[in-house]
Image: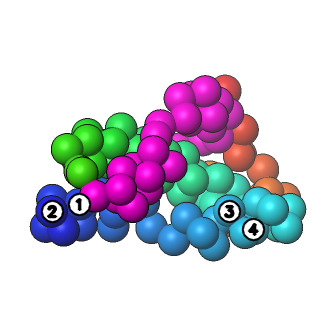
């Protein structure tokens, strides 16, 4: 199971740090791009965990369910490779 999950989890990265920055309103444009990329991995994570039977892992899989609306909004709103800081401009996709 771990060998199947590891590549997908690696793509998600440190989502806790990104969410903490969002909560503190200190997220940078690249944090938003990383969040978008992490959310794009959720369908793959969901399919990999669909066959799990352990109650804890089933609950964990439910928490990782895709949030399509948020992911689509980030895909539309943030450029693929935004600058490091927002004051540099070029963050919003056209």
Residues at badges 4 and 3 in contact (C-beta under 8 Å)?
yes
Residue in view at x 28 percent, y 58 percent: 54
Is 43 located above or below residue 27 in the figure?
Answer: above
Q: Which residue is mark 3?
A: 19
Where residue 19 sits: x, y (%)? 68, 62
Q: Is residue 9 visible?
A: yes
Residue in view at x 15 percent, y 62 percent: 1
Q: Find the magenta span and give its range.
A: 54-80
Residues at badges 2 and 1 in contact (C-beta under 8 Å)?
yes
Q: Which residue is mark 4?
A: 21
In the image, is residue 72 part of the stretch drawn in magenta? yes
Where residue 63 sits: x, y (%)? 50, 49
Say whether disc 4 or disc 2 marks the residue closer to the N-terminus: 2
* CA separation in Å, label 3 and label 1: 21 Å
Q: Which residue is mark 2?
A: 1
> Seen in the image, is 65 located left or right of residue 3?
right
């Amino acid at each position: 199971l771990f060998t199947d999950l590891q590549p997908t989890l690696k793509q998600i990265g440190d989502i806790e740090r990104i969410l903490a920055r969002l909560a503190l309103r200190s997220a940078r444009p690249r944090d938003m791009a990383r969040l978008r990329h992490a959310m794009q991995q959720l369908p793959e994570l969901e399919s990999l965990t669909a066959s799990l039977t352990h109650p804890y892992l089933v609950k964990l899989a439910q928490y990782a369910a895709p949030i399509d609306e948020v992911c689509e909004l980030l895909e539309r709103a943030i450029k693929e490779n935004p600058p490091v800081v927002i004051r540099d401009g070029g963050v919003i996709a056209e």
